[in-house]
């Protein structure tokens, strides 16, 4: 899921978008328009039931440098979603279920009950911000009242493990799910799902282009990187990327439609500057080529973040040519999210 | 049967008395004596725990120590101050929650208001991890239920969940009822666990002790009966035998060394206790559970060999399976001298599964490796993804890092494999292995104990061994060599034991076990001659296949990926296996009823009506 999409749409409606004149070079914005959220586990010393000595869970990084922990010290938060119309409304998906804060992270409530465990992804429908969709190990859950009540809506998906969810920001009722056995598309608000691309194992992440809403990218465990240019109806595998190891996620560069980045196990960070036709490894300076997550900063052109296995988050200001130590130590990042400031 | 006593002479006196007279009059005395000795043992545990706390050491003392001292009314000021200190940095998730429950309830009238307030505040500011499996959820929700009951009518702002006391209690109750229903209709998910039995029985005892709702209290007691009956039927002198959903590297060889044997010691008094530590929490309130006589008798007083079938299920499968909780078919054959137990093999549980073994009886199990079995040592991200919701590539390394250190070791004796299939008929086991090239690993391991009194490699291909009074024929389907047995200690050092490992690097492989009691034969030689003469046909290609006429005269045919046949009739697990099916325990699938019988004693647990019915027939 590309987590800046909701916010891009809002910015596009106003004059704020013009405030950014991205040149294609690393350039810090004097006044970032996005808040930066990270879901991270300090995994080096974590075992269920063991004393935790460091803070894990959700962090907000307003200055792109100093993470501020939000909420409970929770060892596994997989994903975060923030209401584009009210940034104080934050949802996370993690081991204890779906958590919601209505006050910017000061207080929280577990919105799911015992029968929904370990949601893997969570999105807010940009077409209806009260609608929350979660990918679950056993299907898809939908709430139409900001998480107060939930329905299971995964008809048509026989193997229900769902790792990733994207809601089409341009067409209400369309959503795409990355599951154990492939990519499913719903065009009726999750009532029915249709397999549009089989996969040999888990589809790890799906994201929608911020430039062309008909373009989607999916990363997979065994089928490399898949791309769709017709609104997720058909998919093709991109050349030049391995299928031998898991690719964890991919991201579009909001400032440049030709720029993409993906990351995974043994491949580190790979970037494309021609819309996915060719790929280049950008791992010089990274401590390992096992990378959990990559993101492209929508505020700072050329800025990449990545999470090498049990290391710090590394930062690049030249689209991966060089990397520097950013923040955290011994961490695994499950989600980077950029949320537009109103 | 072997009479063992590891505690009070009065128990044996009582047993002798009823055996001599056989009258109900003395049964009451026996039950009373048994109850007294049970409480004495529980008291010993609590005393031990309370005495461990070094009050002069500010670093020492945990919730278990505090709880024990609260039971004994000792050092209450220290208890209060220690609680306040410990609640400042709560940690440990559900393993913190239920100790917290014990301290909160035992301390209601003994802890200072500040200490009680510290506990209350911790349940506001600390969010325990709910976990990812049923033992986690049993601890989590029974604890949440009881704490919500302790602090009723409080708003969501006062709870880490953000939910009110009423909401927390309702959610917890709903989960617990759901789990009880699932267990009594389709079988337990983490079945016959040698350690995790405590993660279920302690929460159930806490509910039986402290729940205000009499129906929840009763359900707690009924589930204790249910789980302890399950333990009783599968114990040989207090040792949990056969297949386990979860066990561990040490205990899979030293069969006694488990928390399950603590419960055997506490409840049946038929083995020594392997340690008191985790059992402390049960012992704190042990007086609130009264083991039914019928379960005690099932565990300690058998009328000859018996066959037991059980239907269980896997824990939740998330990937690589069309079924969420596929069935597990267990078989146990129990005699006084040995027990043979198994499930059907495969990836029935992650990491710590144990699919089959033969265990022989010993007078004193401490330090003894009284078992024999073989496994395909296997690890894979496929297995991890089946049972966990994480990304694949790091998972095997992650579980090793998180305490399951043997998981990716080729010498291990723990864990299941999708390339193993097992069939058991009475005291015969056929385990077949069909291992694809490139699999981790490409061999099988057979465990041969240091405590075998005989081991002879016979020209016939059989390996004849004796353990205790059990004569055992072990037939490896493929050539092998002997290697060291390596065990990891707590510091993850690799230690070589005095046992032997049958290492067979052949992908098409298998093991046949035929057991007998020594008193069935005039001599060891006669046993060997008899086994050699049993008709046996083995094929390894294209897939392993065995035809074997057992010592009991039954013609077995078993081929990998095919239904086993007994005397020409295919075995249909789906229709033939009940939740419990033995001379002592009976339960139909989906019935929610368990009938326990021993002699004239009968107890029926009916979860439909939430009732216990006891009766004694006049035989």
Image: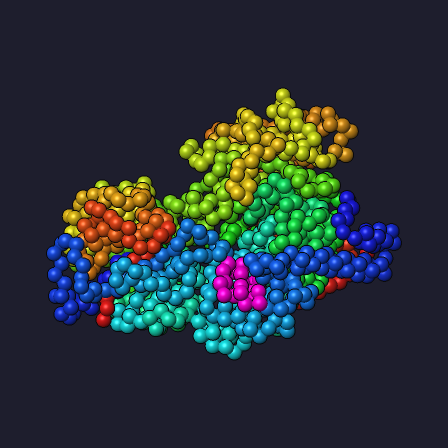
**Hey, which residue is sitting farthest top in the picture?**
B459
**Which residue is at the front of the view, B242 or A17?**
A17
Q: Quadrant of residue B458?
A: top right
Residue B179 falls left or right of residue A46: right
Badge count: 0
Colour pattern of the rendering: rainbow
Q: Residue furthest bottom?
A: B153
Asked if residue B108 shows in the view, the reply is: yes
Tell me which residue sits at (73%, 52%) in the image. Answer: B269
The x, y position of residue B503, in whole percent, is: 54, 30
Q: Locate the C terminus of chain B and report the quarter of the image it occupies.
A: bottom right
Does any portion of residue B511 appear in the rendered image?
A: no
Q: Is the residue B329 above or below the residue B68 in the image?
A: above
Which region is colored magenta?
A: B81-101
Residue B318 drawn above or below residue B503: below
Find residue A151 and report its horizontal and vertical position in percent: 39, 67
Quadrant occupied by the N terminus of chain B: top right
For the point 74% across and 33% down, the residue is B518
């Amino acid at each position: 899921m590309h987590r800046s999409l909701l916010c891009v749409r809002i910015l596009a409606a106003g004059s704020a978008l013009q405030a950014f004149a991205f040149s294609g070079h690393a350039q810090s914005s004097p006044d970032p328009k996005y808040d930066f959220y990270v879901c991270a586990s300090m995994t080096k010393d974590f075992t269920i039931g063991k004393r935790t000595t460091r803070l894990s869970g959700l962090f907000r990084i307003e200055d792109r440098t100093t993470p501020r922990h939000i909420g409970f010290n929770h060892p596994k938060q997989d994903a975060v979603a923030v209401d584009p119309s009210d940034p104080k409304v934050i949802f996370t998906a993690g081991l204890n279920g779906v958590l919601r804060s209505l006050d910017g992270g000061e207080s929280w409530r577990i919105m799911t009950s015992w029968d929904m465990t370990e949601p893997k992804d969570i999105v807010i429908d940009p077409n209806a911000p009260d609608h929350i969709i979660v990918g679950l190990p056993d299907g898809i859950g939908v709430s139409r009242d900001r998480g107060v009540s939930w329905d299971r809506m995964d008809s048509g998906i026989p193997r229900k493990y769902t790792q990733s969810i994207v809601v089409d920001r341009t067409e209400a009722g369309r959503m795409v799910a990355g599951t154990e056995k492939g990519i499913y598309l719903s065009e009726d608000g999750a009532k029915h799902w249709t397999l549009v691309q089989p996969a040999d194992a888990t589809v790890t992440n799906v994201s929608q282009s911020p430039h062309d809403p008909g373009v989607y990218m999916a990363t997979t465990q065994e089928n490399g990187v898949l791309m769709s240019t017709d609104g997720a109806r058909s998919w093709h595998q991109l050349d030049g990327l391995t299928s031998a190891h898991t690719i964890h996620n991919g991201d579009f560069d909001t400032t440049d439609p030709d720029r993409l980045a993906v990351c995974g196990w043994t491949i580190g960070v790979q970037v494309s500057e021609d819309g996915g036709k060719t790929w280049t490894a950008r791992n010089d300076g990274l401590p390992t080529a096992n990378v959990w997550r990559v993101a492209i900063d929508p505020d700072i052109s050329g800025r990449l973040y990545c999470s090498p296995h049990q290391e710090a988050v590394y930062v690049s200001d030249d689209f991966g040519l060089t990397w520097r130590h950013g923040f955290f130590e011994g961490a695994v990042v499950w989600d980077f999210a950029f949320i537009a400031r109103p | 049967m072997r009479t063992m006593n590891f505690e009070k002479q009065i128990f044996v006196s009582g047993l002798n008395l009823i055996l001599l007279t056989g009258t109900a009059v003395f049964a009451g005395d026996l039950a009373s004596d048994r109850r007294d000795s049970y409480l004495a043992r529980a008291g010993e545990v609590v005393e031990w725990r309370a005495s461990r706390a070094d009050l002069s050491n500010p670093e020492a003392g945990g919730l278990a120590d505090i709880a024990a001292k609260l039971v004994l009314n000792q050092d209450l000021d220290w208890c209060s101050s220690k609680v306040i200190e410990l609640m400042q940095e709560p940690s440990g998730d559900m393993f913190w929650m239920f100790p917290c429950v014990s301290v909160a309830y035992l301390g209601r009238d003994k802890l200072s208001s500040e200490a009680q307030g510290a506990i209350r505040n911790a349940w506001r500011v600390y969010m325990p991890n709910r976990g990812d499996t049923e033992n986690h959820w049993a601890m989590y929700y029974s604890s949440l239920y009881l704490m919500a009951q302790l602090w009723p009518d409080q708003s969501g702002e006062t709870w880490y969940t953000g939910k009110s006391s009423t909401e927390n209690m309702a959610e917890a109750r709903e989960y617990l009822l759901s789990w009880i229903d699932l267990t009594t209709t389709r079988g337990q998910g983490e079945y016959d666990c040698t350690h995790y039995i405590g993660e279920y029985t302690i929460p159930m005892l806490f509910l039986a002790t402290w729940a205000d709702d009499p129906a929840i209290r009763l359900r707690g007691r009924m589930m204790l009966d249910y789980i302890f009956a399950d333990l009783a039927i599968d114990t040989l002198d207090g040792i949990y035998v056969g297949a386990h959903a979860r066990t561990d590297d040490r205990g899979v060889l030293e069969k006694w060394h488990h928390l399950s044997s603590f419960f055997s010691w506490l409840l049946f008094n038929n083995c020594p206790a392997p340690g008191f530590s985790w059992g402390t929490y049960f012992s704190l309130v042990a007086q609130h559970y009264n083991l039914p006589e019928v379960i005690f008798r099932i565990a300690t007083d058998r009328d000859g060999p018996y066959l037991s079938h059980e239907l269980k299920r896997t824990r939740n499968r998330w990937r690589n399976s069309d079924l969420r909780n596929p069935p597990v078919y267990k078989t146990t054959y129990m005699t006084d001298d040995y027990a043979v137990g198994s499930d059907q093999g495969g990836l029935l549980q992650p990491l710590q599964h144990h699919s089959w073994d033969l265990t022989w009886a010993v007078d004193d199990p401490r330090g003894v490796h009284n078992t024999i079995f073989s496994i395909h040592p296997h690890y894979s991200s496929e297995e991890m993804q089946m049972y966990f919701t994480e990304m694949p590539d790091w998972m095997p390394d992650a579980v090793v890092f998180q305490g399951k250190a043997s998981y990716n070791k080729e010498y291990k004796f723990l864990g299941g494999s999708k390339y193993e299939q097992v069939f058991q008929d009475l005291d015969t086991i056929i385990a077949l292995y069909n291992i694809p090239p490139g699999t981790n690993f490409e061999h099988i391991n057979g465990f041969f104990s240091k405590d075998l009194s005989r081991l002879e490699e016979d020209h016939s291909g059989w390996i004849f061994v004796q353990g205790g009074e059990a004569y055992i024929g072990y037939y490896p389907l493929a050539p092998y060599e002997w290697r060291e047995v390596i065990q990891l200690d707590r510091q993850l050092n690799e230690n070589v034991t005095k046992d032997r490992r049958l290492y067979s690097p052949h992908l098409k492989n298998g093991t046949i076990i035929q057991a007998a009691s020594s008193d069935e034969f005039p001599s060891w030689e006669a046993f060997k001659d008899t086994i050699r003469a049993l008709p046996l046909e083995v094929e390894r290609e294209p897939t392993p296949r065995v035809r074997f006429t057992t010592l009991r005269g039954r013609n077995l045919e078993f081929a990998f990926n095919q239904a086993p046949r007994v005397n020409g009739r295919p075995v249909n697990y789906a229709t033939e296996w009940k939740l419990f099916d033995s001379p002592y325990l009976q339960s139909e699938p989906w019935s929610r009823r368990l009938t326990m019988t021993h002699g004239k004693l009968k107890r029926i647990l009916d979860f439909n009506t939430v009732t216990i019915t006891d009766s004694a027939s006049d035989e």
